[in-house]
DNA sequence: GACTAATTCAAACACGTGTTTCATACTTAT
DNA sequence: ATAAGTATGAAACACGTGTTTGAATTAGTC
């Protein structure tokens, strides 16, 4: 509790060597911690393992970040400010037919799962947070989960002609997102029942296209299948069971 | 390592009171451990917490189950032998049109997520296992994940007229399963962007029907959209973009 | 080159964990 | 009632964890 040490973890001004912002051990620590937190989770990851991998002393974490949670939240904070999620956002800002926007968003999101063959650790941290929440979960939801979901609600709501907060709109958004997130959550299960799944860039693009096709098939036909629904939207639309 | 104690954890024959199979503390321990393991995960759950909740001594776990992992694997084993997943299996065994089978399977699976309002802890254990695998993961995959996936591959493969191991068939199965599992994996995220999601039995049924409609829309139209594909199956079918 | 602050290091600390010990109460068969 | 095996209880143990300490080392400034 007592922070009588100099503890530059919250240092406001470092006298020298600020411009390059290159504190080698601090950077190395963040880099290594990101990967280790991502595949072990916050609790299971140990400071000693991180420090050994970063060739740093155990006390380095407490010196530079205060404590373990400080290191973790800084890792999460940096992962949010990275350009990884920008592709998804920019796809949503494009001026194009909604079908194309949705397709591009799905592709951008899918490409984020694997970055050059290896799974992107930014998303695995979210997976761990959902299983075992830490104080960083709210931050993650507010910064990436909620904005994306809200934009998708608007987009798909327009496509099916229902308000964004209609239950049917939400169901469609969850259906679309569920198809995506299963690939970074259920990874061990997928590998087990689908050995050919290698997540190469080409295959990831095929997956993205499939998800877009799969989703658009229902979304694009929804309007024609629901006869003149009132704007206030009752609970459920008529079942589009046998559309043929 | 040395098990010189009597250690009935692996006891083959208990002299008395076998018929009722009612060892109170053992049963209580299993019951409590199931819930605690389910929402904390294997590592984060502590033996002391479990024993306090079960009004048992800390040594009870080691006495009845050998060690923590023994308790956990027994919890998992019992959760597999329970009747929870039978509804899903029996739905697959029905003699009915494939569309109805798929719809019933989805409904049975969705109803398993929430058992009377409260989330079913059997599935939350799987969620934790996928994030932080333990030796029990393989068991879970082999007993529930793989069989269900294989039957769905057959079912959907027949519906779209492609072999079960075709990439397109797998993509469709993952799309269907992804829509379901997102509801027990991304629970905190869903609650955040969809406050009205209460998972009442009625709403769960609506969700299940939606997932079935959403999936069948693509699956049922797939055949008519792919012109006479060769049996060996090229990589991708023609995009069913504008089916109207 | 000396002084000062920042940083690193090895060691120790405090604490929670799973596990074990051994004494005690209990149950059952003789 | 007695003896033997079963189950429980409180305390202690061994170990890994995050954290702290204080000295040693480095880097920057005059």
Image (cartoon, coloured by chain):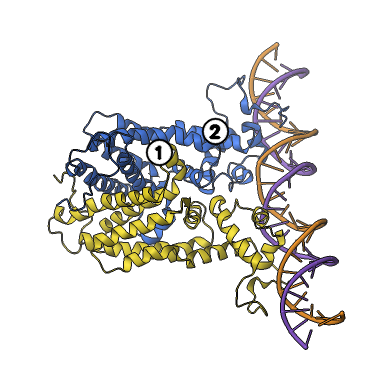
Chain colours: A yellow, B blue, C orange, D purple
Where does residue B17 sit, x and y in percent of width and height? Answer: 58, 22
Q: Are marks 1 and 2 on the same chain?
A: no
Label number found at residue B74: 2
Q: How many marks?
A: 2
- Evaluate whether residue B87 shows in this view: no
Residue B44 is at least partly visible in this image: yes
- The residue lying at 64 percent from left, 53 percent from top is A46
The residue that appears at 37% across and 59% down in the rendered structure is A108
Compare residues A4 and A61 and report the one nearer the observer: A61
Q: Position of residue A101 (x, y in %)?
A: 28, 62
Query: In the rendered view, would you say A177 is above or below A195?
Result: below
Are discs 1 and 2 less than 8 Å apart at CB?
no
Q: Is residue A120 left or right of residue B63?
A: left
Where's the N terminus of chain A, which quadrant? bottom right
- Within-10-Å neighbours for mark 2: few <14, some 14–19, many 20+: some
Whole-number angstrom distance, CA of label 1 to CA of label 2 = 28 Å
Can you say which quadrant of the picture contains the C terminus of chain A?
Answer: top left
| Chain at tag 1 | A
Q: Nearer the viewer, residue B201 or B162?
A: B162
Residue A69 occupies quadrant: bottom right
Disc 1 crowd, CA 10 A, few/some/many (<14, 14-19, 20+): some
Question: Residue A36 got which mark?
Answer: none
Determine which quarter of the picture holds residue D5. top right
Q: Chain of mark 2?
A: B
Q: Nearer the viewer, mark 1 or mark 2?
A: 1
- B104 to the left or right of A138: left
Q: Give the labeled residue for mark 1.
A: A194
Could you tell me which secondary element the residue under label 1 belongs to? loop
x, y percent for residue A200: 41, 48
- Find numbered disc 2 in the image and state the secondary structure of the residue it sits on: helix
Across and down, in percent, residue A4 comes to: 73, 72
């Amino acid at each position: 509790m007592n922070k009588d040490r100099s503890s530059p973890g919250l240092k406001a001004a470092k006298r020298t060597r600020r411009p390059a912002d290159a504190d080698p051990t601090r950077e190395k620590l963040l880099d290594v911690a990101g990967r280790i937190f991502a595949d072990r989770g916050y609790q299971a990851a140990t400071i000693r393992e991180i420090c050994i991998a970063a060739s740093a002393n155990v006390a380095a974490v407490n010196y530079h970040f205060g404590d373990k949670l400080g290191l973790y939240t800084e890792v999460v904070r940096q992962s949010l400010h990275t350009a990884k999620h920008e592709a998804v956002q920019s796809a949503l800002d494009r001026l194009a037919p909604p079908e194309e926007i949705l397709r591009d968003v799905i592709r951008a999101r899918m490409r984020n799962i694997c970055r050059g063959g290896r799974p992107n650790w930014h998303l695995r941290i979210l997976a761990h947070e959902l299983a075992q929440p830490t104080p960083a979960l709210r931050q993650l939801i507010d910064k990436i989960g909620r904005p994306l979901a809200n934009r998708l609600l608007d987009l798909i709501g327009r496509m099916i002609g229902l308000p964004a907060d209609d239950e049917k709109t939400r169901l469609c958004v969850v259906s679309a997102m569920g198809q995506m997130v299963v690939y970074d959550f259920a990874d061990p299960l997928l590998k087990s029942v689908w050995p050919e799944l290698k997540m190469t860039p080409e295959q990831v693009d095929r997956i993205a296209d499939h998800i877009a096709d799969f989703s658009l098939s229902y979304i694009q036909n929804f309007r024609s299948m629901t006869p003149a629904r009132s704007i206030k939207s009752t609970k459920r639309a008529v079942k589009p069971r046998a559309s043929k």
